[in-house]
Amino acid sequence: MSASTLPSVSVAMPMRNAAAFVAESVRSVLSQATPTYAVQLVVVDDGSSDGSADVVRAVLDEQTWPNATCEILTGPCNGIAAALNAAFAACTGTYLARCDSDDLFPPGRLARHAAFLEDPANAEFVAVCGGFDTVDPKGALVSRLHEDCESEDITDKLRRGDTPTHFGTFLVRRTVVEALGGARDYFAGTEDVDLQLRIGTIGRVWFEPDTAYIYRLHHASSTHTQASPVREFLTEQARKFARQRAEGKPDDLARGVAEAPPTDDATTPGGKPMDVGEQIQGMLIGRSWKAVAAGQRSESFRLGWAAIKARPIHPAGYTNLLKLLILPTLRHKTTAPISSSR
């Protein structure tokens, strides 16, 4: 079977100043292609000034990628939602996924999810998604989210405004994204939250707990450059709108009455973006206590030291390590501190 007749998966990759990471991201997507599934990668260069597009071209030149294609488009430079929609418009595959230009797909992820959607027994499902890992800027594991979860239908969760995972883990039937009209500009930086919640209004969504996405935590990511009050407001709006739709009503944005987001100003009190070091440290501290609860004392100490290195001038890591050292061996009775996630 030729690549043109294979079941195909398209991947949208919005990109802006990602030269430090995009080569690895592109390779992780193109290597998803198999003799059974073709992969189309659409990269939208949305105003990069660091030569990101040249980095992508170099990856394409370094080897052949059987059953995989990649095109680089010039973006509209009108926000992340517009860039994402430009990529969606160029995607032609039966199924659609998103990979940001600083993140990664784990090996075999697209074929596994495409096989689920190809199965006639799963015809009612419009999307399948999974768990995700977070890594630091160098690619070292920070947390493995959803490792204790089970396979389940998450449609009802999405319809009431819950987002159990990251949109990067989703594989969606392309016709569904088209029916929704893609991402909405109002959700600058949280368009992925709104999009996955709206997918739940079209049909059923299945969750598999295996790692389906690798999310990189670093200072230049949109999560860590957007003022926290703006991100928190837009995330809550997405959840509020989902609840409105669940009641059978058009959401406020569809009715044209959505409240304007606060100003994205990091100089106002409480307006700073989320600190990546604090986020990484919190996740590592949480993992250290899970290791204690599992009787893995050596691993708990290793994670405790990693938490210190993530934020060496902050006392939280040292306090945590001291607690790990002075507490007696615990036998599955420790309650782990809650760590922050994305």
Image: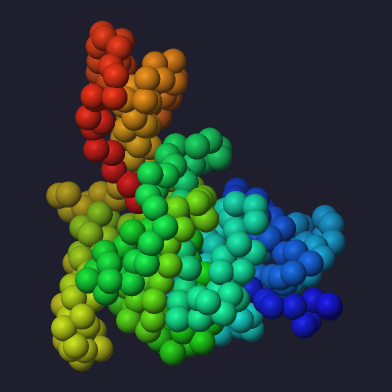
In the picture shown, does residue 72 fall above or below 328?
below
Most foreground residue, 320 or 265: 320
Q: Is residue 280 visible?
A: yes
Q: Is residue 51 visible?
A: no
Q: Residue 59 vs residue 212: left or right?
A: right
Image position, residue 123 (x, y; %): 50, 81
Residue plotted at (30% across, 77% down): 186
Residue plotted at (72% across, 64% down): 33
Number of numbered labels in the structure image: 0
Most foreground residue, 17 or 229: 229
Q: Residue 102 vs residue 69: left or right?
A: left
In the picture shown, does residue 333 fall above or below 228?
above
Image position, residue 213 (x, y; %): 51, 54
In the picture shown, does residue 64 fall above or below 138?
below
Most foreground residue, 36 or 225: 36
Image position, residue 246 (x, y; %): 21, 80
Image position, residue 185 (x, y; %): 36, 78
Say which quadrant the N terminus sits in.
bottom right
Q: Residue 157 vs residue 180: left or right?
A: left
Q: Residue furthest front?
A: 121
Residue plotted at (34% across, 30% down): 290
Most foreground residue, 9 or 183: 9
